[in-house]
Image: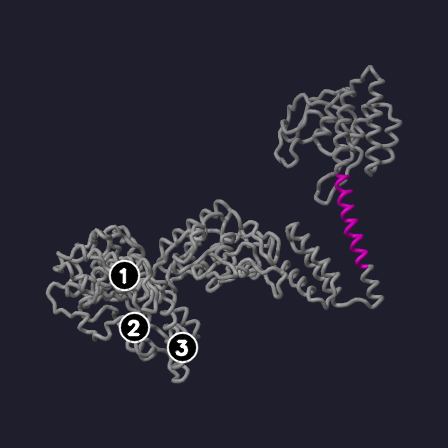
Amino acid sequence: LVCQKEDDKEDISPEDLYQVGTVSLIKQTFKLPDNSVKCVVEGMFRVRIRDCPQTEPHFTARIEILEDVEEVDREELENIRLTIQAQIENFLHLGIPFPADLLSALSTQQSLGRLADLLASYLLTTKEEKQQILEEAHVGRRLEKLSNFLGEELRKLRLQSQIMSKVQEEMGKTQREYFLRQQLKAIQEELGETDEGTAEINDLRKRLEEKKMPEEVQKKAMKELDRLARIPSASPEHSWIRTYLEWMIDVPWTERTDDKIDIQEAKKILDQDHYDLEKVKEHILDFLAVIKLKGEIKGPILCFVGPPGVGKTSLGQSIARALGRKFYRMSLGGIRDEAEIRGHRRTYVGALPGRIVQGIAQVGAINPVFMLDEIDKVGADFRGDPSAALLEVLDPEQNKSFTDNYLAVPYDLSQVMFICTANVVETIIPALLDRMEVLRIPGYTRDEKLRIARRHLVPKQIKEQGLTEYQVTFSDQALYEIIDQYTREAGVRNLEREISNICRKVAREIVTREKTGLKVSAKDVEKFLGVPKISPSQIEDEDKVGVATGVAVTPIGGDILLVEATIYSGEGKLILTGQLGDVMQESAKAALSYVESKADEFGLTKDFFKKTDIHIHVPEGAIPKDGPSAGITMLVALISAVTKKPVKRDVGMTGEITLRGRILPVGGIKSKLLAAHRAGIKTFVLPAKNEKDLTEIPREIKSSLDIKLADNVDDVLQYTFVEEAKVTPLESQVSPRKRKPVTVQVSELSG
């Protein structure tokens, strides 16, 4: 009998067998249910296989008998036997049972080689160790190997015994505490002292023990629970501590959702949910790819900036869907109290965690997609600055140990994917903006809105109003009518609202007049929505003196900005009205200085400006305005006023001016061109250095606008003035009494 080296190998060769085995006597055989045979054998003596002359149909082998090699020094062998006997006693102390005949053989067996074989067969656990004993013909070395193997087994057993002792000790403490609590419960029941308070404490204790928390948090919670048990239930502090413990249980500490990042699937989701926005989508997919490779979120916070209704919030929802994470939106508009972010200290009545922790508790996972909506609307007052509190929340290096004032223990926000949205970035504090990666979504063109309505808005509203696609359809002209006459905006929020209004009215007609369906045409729109809310164009009806058309970026996208200038006899004052900011006022002064320096070219006398007051007004005075991009518009309006030359009404412009007449680049070009397109402007004058921004402009916008690039004021003037037209001075349309401004900001002119 020889042992196979690899037990799971079926097709074996002589090389797969150990070379040393035994010649054995078959004592008994058993036939098993699977037709295999089990044999009981007795080993007679060791043998070594010399070769295998036959392998089919069965193995045959030539063998040589291995006799035991006895040591001459019987005293040394006896010492080894005594060592092994002591090891056996240690096995017995560790609770390892031994057969009686084996213990008897230990004291009576005369052949030490035979004794080593008996002990090895019973005590050694691995096939390799037993084979080493079998192959050792030298009795002394066989006993030494056996003693070494037994020593190693003893070491393992002692280690296991120590571990089991510790486990049993801990289990003993737990069981003892459990039995004591059960006894206490039984005693209280016998005395009739069991009340709702005790049951509540026991319930909280059980929930805290089952909740997976960091060790520090668990200790804090248990300490508060012990306090709760000692405080009378009528005490106000009792309810405060109970509420605190409920929050500690409700807040997720280790619960998370598994990320399922598939870039192709994420792209499919983004394309399904949003039309166009290719650059933004590409950036989001790059961001998700990095998360997939690194396995963590560590980097700038994404901040979507754009007008209302362009899809900023829904982009966050799509990202959550692509990641397989839960989504939570927190609106920051109007928040002025720092405690809204960090939470209230528990010393205050009605204290609660901050809205960050509340939101995470609501979704029940420590790794949601958390949207901070309208982050540009955060304010500050005597209660603190929420923007400063957000610095820690949005900093990947610090938010791993964010401390909410209410919980008063560190909370890990590093696994939360924060996304911010804003209409403008100017009101965001620089330190906070520095932590964000800004992705701008400027707005949609007329044709893009049509396609968005077709793909998303119309099907959604038909479903929400209980209709089917067979009951109501919209023609393209009807949708264009809604876009042009009822919803001039950068996004599509109002467009969706008006489509919803029409669907409701169609539903009413179907119910009351028993119609089967209706196709909404352009002429039906006014019947359903009433008189158009927006005129087809915002530009002037005719070319006028002293009126120039600029374009500005506003929180709702781009918009037309008319600048009016008029002159009249006076003392050389410059009057600015229309709630102009400091930068805009300086642009007006720079425009005036440029005109004064070029007085000869404009045919003006040297004392013209000493005897003339100049009034520049930007309509819609209730709205604050600022920025340098209206500089060229103010200059054109001023030149028109002093030269009595009318400005082309269908020419829009933007750009900052210098005293030398250079035109400097400005921002927000896409939003401004979209606004010009919506307002019906035909020609648009743009700083030459903004030419690179035209790559982002949709083709339909560039084809509808005649875009002129200007390096200096002379370039601008050749595109803006009417050469031969009837002059309509602005001051001739205003009575002398109305010329006097109500709001006056005066700066004395020099020279």
Q: Is residue 178 magenta?
A: yes
Left or right position of 378 against 492: right
Q: Residue furthest top?
A: 72
Quarter the C terminus occupies: bottom left
Q: Which residue is mark 1?
A: 747
Please give the range of residues in magenta: 160-182
Q: Which residue is mark 2?
A: 534
Q: How far apart are labels 3 and 1 at the CA level? A: 57 Å
Residue 233 percent coordinates (x, y): 73, 67
Neighbor class of circle 1 (other Cα within 10 Å; few <14, some 14-19, many 20+) is few
Identify which residue, 501 or 51, lies in the foreground. 501
Please tell me whether the stretch drawn in magenta is mainly helix, strand or loop.
Answer: helix
Residue 296 percent coordinates (x, y): 51, 47
Identify which residue, 388 or 248, lies in the foreground. 388
**Image point 71% across, 58% down: which residue?**
225
Colour mapping:
one colour
For marks 2 and 1 on the same chain, the one whose residue lies earlier in the sequence: 2
Q: Which residue is mark 3?
A: 504
**Image point 12% across, 63% down: which residue?**
723
**Are the two marked residues, 2 and 1, in contact with CB atoms closer than 8 angstroms?**
no
Neighbor class of circle 2 (other Cα within 10 Å; few <14, some 14-19, many 20+) is some
